[in-house]
Image (spheres, helix red, strand yellow):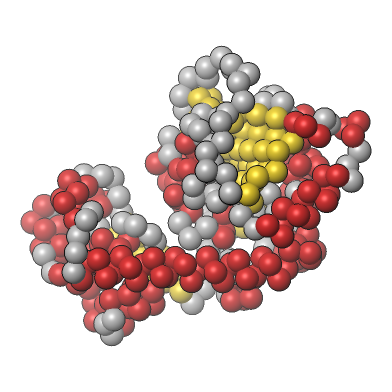
């Protein structure tokens, strides 16, 4: 940890404090911070450099964008008491939070427009970037090591994970935020062979991965297949998934390795240009998950990663009680 005096000096400037309050809520690009603060980019960059030198923030580049996130004492909770009194702040901070909400809304609206326009060709779009058959085979090998139990597929899209894993699950919940995607998933489900699984064991749900409509510790297996790169805050999405994971449960994330294919952000609404092993492990650790296995699949235009995380709590006996939904749209 940096010397306390260095940290306090970094936080003493009003602009730097505003930046810190913003990125504690959401990882932002430098351009978005400039937009919210209404200051010039050179001035904002100068303040960010001071925060970096104080060990409070770190920058990482994705394509042509540079994102800022908390680190050190700002990320490990040591400074949380300093910010507790600012939760109901007024004036300039309140205006910053309103602008932050606008940034969130604009990001979400862009993604929704994209999903609505491309729902029907989703599987084809995926095949342009990765060899899905190889990914699916690797996922099956990883998950075949123990029973699936109750499964939650977050961001189910057109329902491919239903086809692959519902037959071996005690119950399978497929969640997506986009209604068009779910309509395709339902159509696909109705055309599946009944002998492979019981349709009443599959539940298709409209919901947001940032606020899952389920109680705590509801699922044994959680899948995030090619969905995390759409999350504005990937660590928040992982923490929320971990909330509904049972003790000893498994979380499998399939996504792109870190890359610089800027067109995926511009044309396909990707919020993040892939992920590193270090980044996923950090997010898992914060959520109480242990990174148990990772695999890289080469061969497509982009490398695909599979990360298996295990909940670190001791596994508890199953009750067989169906979890209660909360706030299902």
Residue at figure coordinates x 68%, y 67% from the top left? 116
Residue 100 coordinates in the image, percent (x, y): 36, 67
In this rendering, position of residue 40 left or right of residue 110:
left
In this rendering, position of residue 186 left or right of residue 253:
right
Q: Quadrant of residue 189?
A: top right
Residue at figure coordinates x 73%, y 68% from the top left? 118
Between residues 157 and 76, which one lies in front from this camera angle? 157
Residue 237 visible within the image? no
Residue 146 coordinates in the image, percent (x, y): 68, 24
Residue 232 coordinates in the image, percent (x, y): 48, 60
Q: Is residue 26 above or below residue 208?
A: below
Q: Quadrant of residue 205?
A: top right
In this rendering, position of residue 111 left or right of residue 37:
right
In this rendering, position of residue 9 left or right of residue 297:
left
Q: Is residue 234 above or below residue 99?
A: above
Residue 154 visible within the image? yes
Residue at figure coordinates x 75%, y 31% from the top left? 201
Q: Quadrant of residue 295?
A: top right
Q: Is residue 285 above or below residue 299?
A: above
Residue 57 coordinates in the image, percent (x, y): 29, 60
Between residues 58 and 87, which one lies in front from this camera angle? 87
């Amino acid at each position: 940890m940096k010397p306390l005096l260095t940290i306090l000096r970094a936080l003493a400037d009003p602009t730097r404090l505003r930046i810190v309050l913003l990125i504690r809520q959401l990882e932002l690009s430098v351009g978005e911070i400039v937009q919210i603060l209404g200051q010039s980019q050179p001035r904002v960059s100068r303040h960010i450099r001071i925060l970096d030198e104080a060990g409070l923030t770190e920058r990482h580049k994705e394509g042509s964008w540079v994102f800022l996130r908390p680190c050190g004492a700002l990320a490990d909770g040591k400074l949380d008491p300093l910010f507790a009194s600012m939760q109901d702040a007024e004036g300039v901070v309140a205006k910053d939070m309103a602008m932050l909400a606008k940034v969130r809304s604009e990001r979400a609206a862009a993604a929704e427009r994209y999903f609505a326009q491309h729902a029907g060709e989703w599987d084809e779009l995926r095949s342009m970037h990765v060899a899905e058959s190889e990914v699916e085979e690797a996922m099956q090998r990883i998950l075949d090591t123990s029973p699936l139990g109750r499964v939650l597929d977050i961001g189910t899209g057109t329902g491919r994970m239903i086809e692959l894993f519902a037959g071996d699950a005690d119950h399978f919940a497929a969640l997506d935020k986009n209604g068009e995607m779910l309509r395709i998933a339902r159509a696909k489900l109705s055309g599946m062979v009944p002998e492979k699984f019981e349709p009443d064991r599959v539940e298709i749900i409209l919901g947001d991965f940032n606020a899952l409509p389920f109680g705590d510790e509801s699922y044994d297996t959680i899948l995030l297949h090619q969905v995390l790169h759409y999350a504005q805050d990937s660590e928040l999405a992982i923490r929320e998934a971990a909330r509904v994971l049972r003790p000893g449960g498994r979380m499998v994330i399939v996504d792109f390795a870190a890359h610089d294919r800027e067109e995926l952000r511009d044309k396909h609404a990707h919020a993040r240009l892939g992920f590193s092993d270090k980044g996923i492990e950090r997010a898992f650790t914060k959520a109480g998950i242990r990174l148990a296995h990772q695999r890289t699949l080469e061969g497509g235009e982009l490398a695909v990663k599979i990360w298996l995380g295990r909940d670190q709590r001791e596994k508890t006996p199953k009750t067989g009680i169906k979890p209660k939904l909360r706030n299902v749209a």
